[in-house]
Image (spheres, rainbow, N blue to C red):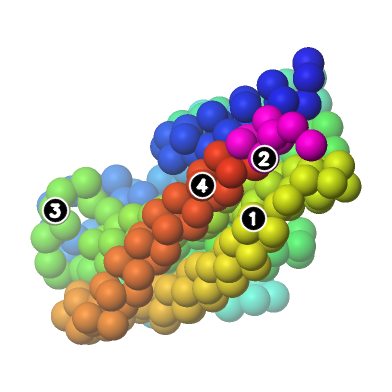
Amino acid sequence: MSARKLLLIFVLSLFGLFIPATVSAQEMEMKLLTGGPIAAGSSFRIAINVNTQDIRVIAADALINFDETFLSITSVENGGFFGNVAGSKLTEKKNTYLVSGWQTSVAYAKGNRQPEALAILNLKALRNGTTMLSLECQQGRESDSNLNQADQARDILDCSKLLPLTVTAGQSITGNFEDKNSKIIRLVRQLLDKFADKISRLDQVLVRIKSISERLKSEGKDVQSVENRISQAETTSASLNRLLDQMRQSLAELPGLSSSDLIKNINFGQVKKYFDLKQELRDYHRELQEMGLILRKTDGQKQ
C-alpha cells in the first residue's frame, strides 16, 4: 500500500476517534445484598464481586477493613466464581478480614466480562450508626487485595477502581443497595476514565502526525504551517492532562463525606472544569483533523 493511501486512511480514521470505547479495568467491588432496614443485632449479607475483563485468573484475595465495634463478620460462602473460597479474621491485624478464592489448577483458570460473586459475607450489625467497609489495596503489593493472572502469575487488580461500601444500621436501605456516595464517585470516575482514554488516543494521533510531517519535510515539502499547529496541539495536550489530574485529585477527596457535604464539594469550579475539559477535547480533536487534511494536501503536491 502506498504512503499516500496510508495517509488517507489515517486522516479518515481521525473522524472516528470519538466512537465510545470501553475502558477496561480488572475490578473488585462490594455490594449490599440485604434490603430493608438493618437494625442493631440483625444480620445482613454483602457480595464481593470480581470482573477480570476476560483475563483468566487462578486466585483472588479480598482484604477487608472494617470497624469491629460496628460489625461482626460471622461467616463466608462461596459466591461461585472460583471452586474454592475461605475466609478468616486476621489475628495479627485488628479490624481486618481476609477472603481468598482459588482454582486447584491453571487448567481451570476463570475469566469474565461482567461482575460475578467471589464470595458472600454474612455479617451482623452490633449497634446503630453508620460505618464503612473498604478493600485494602496498594498497586504493586501482593499481600493485600489482588487478582492473580493465571499465565503470568501477576496481580492485575486495578486498585484505583476500588470503592468503600457504607452501611447504616437503624435506617432503610433502598434502590439497588449501592451506597449513594459511592455510586456518584464511581460514575464520575468512569467519566474521567473515558476522558483519559480519549486524550490518550488523541496524543497517539499527534505522534503519528509529527512522524508524517517529518517524513514530508525530509522530502522537501513545506510543512511549516503544520509544525506551528503541532506546537499548539502539544500545549493543548498538556493542558488537558493537567486539568484531568486536577479533577482526579478533587475526586480522591470525596469518599467518606456525608451526602450533604458531597454535594457541597461538587461546586461551580469543578463543574466549570468539566465543561472546560470537554471543550478542549473537542478543540484538540478538530485541530488534529485539520492537520491531517493539510498533510494529505501537502503529500499530493508536486515538487
Q: Within 10 Å of the Cα at label 4, are there few (<14), some (14-19), or many (20+) other Cα atoms?
A: some
Q: Which residues are magenta?
A: 296-303
Magenta stretch: includes residue 300: yes
Evaluate if marks 2 and 3 touch, with contact meaning CB atoms under 8 Å apart: no
- Residue at the image position 26 percent from the left and 73 percent from the top: 271
Say which amino acid is labelled 3: Thr
- Residue at the image position 50 percent from the left and 54 percent from the top: 287
- Please name whichever residue, 48 or 93, is drawn nearer the observer in this view of the structure: 48
Circle number at residue 226: 1
Side (left or right) of 268 relative to 115: left
Residue 83, compared with residue 242, is above or below; it is above
**Where on the picture, by quarter, is residue 59?**
top right
Q: Which residue is mark 3?
A: 174
Q: Earlier in the sequence, mark 2 or mark 3?
A: 3
Residue 54, compared with residue 125, is above or below; it is above
Evaluate if marks 1 and 4 touch, with contact meaning CB atoms under 8 Å apart: no
Q: Which residue is mark 4?
A: 290
Does residue 210 appear in this view? yes
Say which element carries label 4: helix
Label 2 or label 3, whichever lies nearer to me, is 2
